[in-house]
């Protein structure tokens, strides 16, 4: 029973073969959590079909179901795969999974947004039909990420109360692969970059699954877009020197192919192929520097959310979203509030979109947001509760490591977001933050800037942890959740007050807005520009942008949200959150054209000289 622990994306190479298990699986809910007792791992009787990848919620009667659920797929595994190790890999099962092969448990995984894999060689019958079964569960607690609560409704039915504002979609949300690979594999690799005039250096480092064999050697080759070899080197770590390198940027997302070959006395043992972009990213004073040049972020907070798929990978939707972003002159987004499907980062690498990569670190403040279901039962602040440090912190640390391990080689990833809207008002938050921020910098070979988002009015005076961020990120809703109303003058005063406080604090760091927005009911117009109307959304953004332009240290604007999205029902949600500038099916609200005008005229290096 081994979790192979490699986050490398499945690729077909000279030594590796990947077989997709996406498609139709069998599905069944298990409200009494009695599936295992009843041997469902052997045979899932009375099941119904379910498509993978997708969330099951949109395809069942009780879309709000909480508890265990089961998937099963029968598949004949070819004799041809016998000579190598066989691994099963799930892109994500939300929020936890136990995997069985032919009724025998092969492993468990916690966390609904990360890939995991198990070596199943000893469990399969080659040449015969095999039964792959997954027992999933979508419950949340104080010590899961994201956080939430389980309760029973008046009818005695188990429900989940998320401490976050997106629907708790669950199931096998991402692709499943069978991977045939050698015993001794290239387990991981990483790169860092030095741009030196005409020559750029790619420093690489490789990790093998077994390394105690003296006969093994490694070769690393780098190819340009035309498949010309531009540099090569030997050994577990080394330098690739590239003359006249094409640096990666949103305007020129040039990718090189990296080929890593492991040989034993000149016999090829393993080969891994990937695509990298040569670029640097750092923070200097109040600037974010991409390849040494100041960059201004224009874009969005988003969700992986689409009709029918729920949170399931929907690549066509992603491609359309990226097309719309580019069309509007946007250059970036944040993976609010969890790591997205790996294919999204690959597309961003190719298309040239910058990503603030956020883990599922949301809901670390259950006392507030009553409209999200907070009952007020919990009297102790989040970080004051002992289990936050004893149970959640070690898991959070592991998740930060895993996120960075998975995404560190993407040129599109320029920053890590380590919390969304935590409660930072108590002293008890400080040691927790310190650990998390240290973990990120230690885990990332490229030492990317780290951030987290501050909510409400939390700022210099009342946040105990803002100093940990390399880039200050604000989620602000002046004019919506506070100072609300058609007359936005109070909102303007508050936004100025807020930014003046940051200015006077002399923090000398870049500050970006990672959320600001107003719910807008598509098609609702109002001469007076009332809240929920298209006109309100337009006036709201016009105000914010005018004020952003007055402050040189504001180095980015990522509005909330790219598209309307599904949430838990509630008195402030009409069919979900309506702060999208596009509807859920990606029709533009009028604001889209205002933003397109602004962003196509603001250069990527806006405020470089301020
Ligand atoms: C926030 C949260 C986001 C919500 C948003 C809203 O501050 O970070 O998850 O969806 O506000 O619209 O209330």
Image (tube, rainbow, N blue to C red):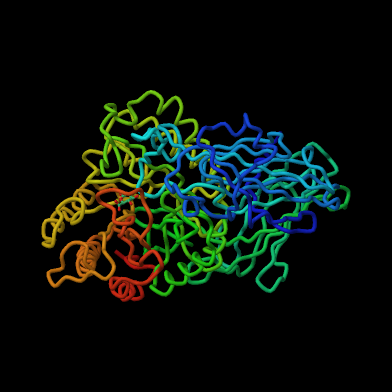
- Residue 607: quarter of image: bottom left
In-front residue for pair 154/12: 154
> Which is more toward the observer, 46 or 390?
46
* Residue 21 rendering spot, x and y as whole percentages: 68, 54
Image quadrant holding the C terminus, namely: bottom left
Q: In this view, does 233 lie above or below 535?
A: above
The total number of labels drawn is 0
Query: Quadrant of the image for the N terminus?
Result: top right
Q: In this view, does 48 lie to the left or right of 336?
A: right
572 left or right, relative to 154 = left
Report the front residue among 593 and 80: 80
Residue at 42% across / 45% down in the picture? 64
On the picture, is 543 further left or further right than 395?
left
Res. 416 in view: no
- In the image, taking residue 167 as reference, residue 242 lies left or right, namely right
Percent coordinates x, y for residue 571 in the rendering: 25, 49
Outermost residue to the front = 46
Q: Position of residue 478 (x, y in %)?
A: 19, 54
Residue at 57% from the left image edge and 61% from the top image edge: 346
What is the x, y in percent for residue 216? 82, 45
Q: Can residue 229 be seen in this view?
A: yes
Q: Which of 393 and 46 is in front in this view?
A: 46
Quarter of the view holding residue 518 = bottom left
């Amino acid at each position: 029973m081994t979790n192979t622990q490699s986050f490398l994306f499945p690729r077909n190479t000279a030594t590796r073969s990947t077989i997709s298990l996406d498609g139709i699986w069998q599905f069944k809910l298990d409200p009494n959590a009695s599936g295992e007792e009843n041997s469902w791992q052997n045979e899932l009787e009375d099941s119904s079909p379910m498509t993978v990848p997708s969330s099951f919620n949109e395809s069942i009667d009780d879309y709000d179901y909480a508890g265990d659920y089961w998937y099963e797929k029968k598949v004949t595994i070819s004799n041809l795969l016998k000579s190598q190790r066989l691994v099963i890999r799930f892109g994500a099962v939300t929020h936890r999974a136990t995997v069985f092969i032919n009724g025998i448990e092969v492993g468990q995984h916690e966390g609904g947004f990360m890939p995991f894999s198990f070596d199943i060689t000893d469990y399969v019958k080659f040449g015969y039909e095999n039964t792959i079964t997954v027992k999933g569960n979508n419950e949340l607690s104080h010590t899961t990420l994201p956080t939430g609560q389980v309760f029973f409704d008046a009818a005695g039915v188990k429900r989940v109360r998320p401490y976050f504002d997106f629907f708790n979609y669950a199931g096998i949300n991402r692709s499943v692969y069978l991977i045939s690979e050698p015993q001794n594999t290239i387990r991981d690799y990483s790169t860092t970059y030095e741009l030196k005039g005409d020559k750029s250096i790619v420093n690489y480092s490789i990790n093998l699954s077994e390394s105690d064999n003296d006969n093994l050697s490694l070769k690393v080759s780098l190819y340009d877009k035309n498949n010309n070899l531009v540099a090569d080197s030997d050994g577990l770590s080394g330098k690739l020197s590239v003359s006249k390198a094409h640096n990666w940027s949103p305007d020129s997302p040039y990718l090189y192919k990296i080929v890593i070959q492991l040989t034993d006395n000149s016999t090829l043992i393993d080969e891994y192929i990937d695509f990298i972009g040569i670029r640097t990213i750092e923070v200097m004073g109040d600037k974010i520097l991409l390849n040494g040049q100041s960059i201004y972020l224009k874009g969005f907070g988003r969700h992986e959310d689409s009709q029918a798929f729920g949170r399931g990978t929907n690549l066509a939707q992603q491609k359309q979203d990226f097309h719309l972003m580019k069309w509007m002159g946007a250059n970036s987004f944040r993976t609010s509030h969890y790591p997205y499907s790996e294919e999204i980062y690959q597309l961003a690498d190719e298309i040239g979109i910058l990503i603030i990569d956020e883990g599922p670190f949301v809901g670390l403040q259950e006392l507030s947001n009553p409209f999200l279901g907070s009952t007020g039962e919990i009297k102790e602040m989040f970080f004051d509760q002992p289990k936050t440090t004893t149970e959640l912190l070690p898991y959070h640390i592991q998740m930060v490591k895993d996120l960075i391990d998975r995404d560190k080689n993407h040129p599109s990833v320029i920053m890590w977001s380590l919390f969304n809207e935590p409660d930072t008002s108590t002293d008890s938050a400080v040691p927790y933050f310190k650990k998390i921020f240290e973990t990120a910098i230690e885990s990332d070979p490229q030492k990317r800037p780290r951030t987290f988002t501050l909510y409400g009015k939390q700022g210099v005076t009342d946040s105990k942890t803002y100093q940990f961020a390399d880039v200050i990120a604000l989620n602000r809703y002046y004019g919506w959740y506070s100072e609300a109303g058609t007359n936005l003058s109070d909102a303007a005063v508050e936004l100025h007050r807020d930014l003046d406080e940051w200015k006077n604090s002399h923090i000398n760091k870049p500050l970006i807005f990672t959320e600001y927005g107003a719910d807008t009911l598509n098609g609702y117009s109002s001469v007076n520009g009332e809240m929920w109307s298209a006109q309100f959304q337009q006036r709201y953004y016009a105000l914010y942008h005018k004020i952003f332009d007055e402050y040189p240290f504001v180095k980015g604007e990522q509005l909330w949200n790219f598209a309307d999205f599904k949430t838990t029902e509630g008195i402030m949600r009409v069919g979900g959150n309506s702060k999208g500038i596009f509807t859920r099916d990606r029709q533009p609200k009028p604001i889209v054209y205002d933003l397109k005008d602004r962003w196509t005229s603001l250069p990527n290096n806006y405020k470089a000289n301020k």
